[in-house]
Amino acid sequence: EKDGYDWFMLKEIAEQPHAIADTLLGRLSDHGAIVLDEVRISDQEVRDIDKVFVVSCGTSYHAGLIAKYAIEHWTRIPVEVELASEFRYRDPVLDRSTLVVVISQSGETMDTLMAMRHAKEQRARVLAICNTNGSTIPRESDAVLYTRAGPEVAVASTKGFLSQVVACYLVGLFLAQVRGIKYADEVAAIVDELRALPAAVEKVLSEMEPVRELARSLADSPTILFLGRHVGYPVALEGALKLKELAYIHAEGFAAGELKHGPIALIGEGTPVVVVAPSPRGRESVHGKVVSNIQEVRARGARTIVIAEEGDDDVLPYADHVIRVPRTPTLLAPVVTTIPMQVLACEIADTRGLDVDQPRNLAKSVTVE
Ligand code: M6R
């Protein structure tokens, strides 16, 4: 039941610290090692992998996009991310040394299942990241890493998504551990940061009241745009998807650097633009560039809503609204920056009087191709 929440979605958003903690449970050793005994792929097979595909749909596809940044960085194995509905129709290059990671909350999504069967026919190794024990996708895959988010009832995926993202980090770190790690110090530090994620998520959740208030003021917007860069880009895509599916408002997510190649023409007086600002720290910081993007859209009339790390004051001159998230290593930031996106979409839909848990035209698991 809803435990006093108005919507299952609100309950499931609130359950995210637990979903993440449970997904990590027993999988991080005291010595900072990743323990994935259930993933039955031998060390030799892991060493032989020369390419990774991540294949999924919808929100799970966004988790895959985040996985690419993490897995490539930690392992130096090339990673391609593909929509399941496209994957098998374009004759992808697959063989025994390809690892195909399929991500599905329900484990029953037909597009993902068919893509997985195609990969298996081509002799690729298939690892499923799934939230539903005993569902079809993990039953047919070579190996499975279960997310432990618990049952997700709302059609819009929230705790399912964040636990998928965390599972993807575990896969990346596990592959890196078996193959030998280039950034050993960084990886050791990341394990500690993973442990800190549930508390960070709890903190974000406790500060969402201003976001709800802001959402109510956006409920009549004809369109809302979302911008991000690096791992913030999939978060922008996820923010736009949530808004479309729940609030039936036109929304698009863009890579912030692409603005000048076309989308900036969409911006007029008062157009709301939600921007995921990257951390000002970090090796490949694109922070300054995103600050310029915020400035550019503001100069063209946009109402800017900026999700930024605590202490990042560079965004202040150009932000109409700032939503703060705790400091987090760049690759892990989506775990905190996604939450305001979920809350915005949920609250906007609620303000518009819509059924948040059962949006029109959608089903929880899509069992047709
Ligand atoms: O069960 P799956 O993870 O395979 O589902 C994939 C998509 O259908 C799903 O994520 C969908 O996009 C959600 N409604 C998003 O909130």
Image (cartoon, rainbow, N blue to C red):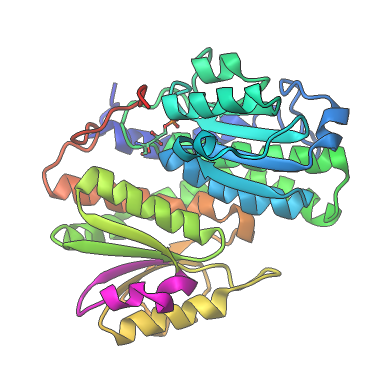
What count of labels does the image hold?
A: 0
The answer to whether 43 appears left or right of 137 in the picture is: right
Describe residue 246's horizontal placement relative to residue 133 as left or right.
left
Residue for point 26% across, 63% down: 224
Image: 357 above or below 232: above
Q: Is residue 34 depicted above or below 228 in this figure?
A: above
Ligand 1 is found in which quarter of the picture? Answer: top left
Q: Nearer the viewer, residue 74 or 337?
A: 74
| Magenta span contains residue 20 | no
The structure residue drawn at horizontal position 67% and vertical position 68%, both measured from the top left corner, is: 282
Q: Position of residue 84 (x, y in %)?
A: 49, 36
State the extent of the magenta-drawn residues as a range.
256-275
Q: Which corner quadrant holds the C terminus? A: top left
Q: Give percent across and percent down for residue 264.
A: 34, 77
Q: Residue at x 78, y 48 (%)?
A: 75
Q: Please give left or right for residue 31 compared with residue 54 in the image.
A: right
Q: Residue at x 79, y 37 (%)?
A: 49
Q: Is residue 299 above or below residue 211?
A: below
Residue 248 in sight in this render: yes
**Residue 12 quadrant:** top left
The picture quadrant where one finds residue 140 is top right
Question: Where 358 sits versus 308, above or below?
Answer: above
**Picture quarter with the N terminus:** top left
- Residue 243: give x, y in percent of width and height: 28, 50
Residue 17 visible (yes or no):
no
- Is residue 184 toward the left or the right of residue 59 in the image? right
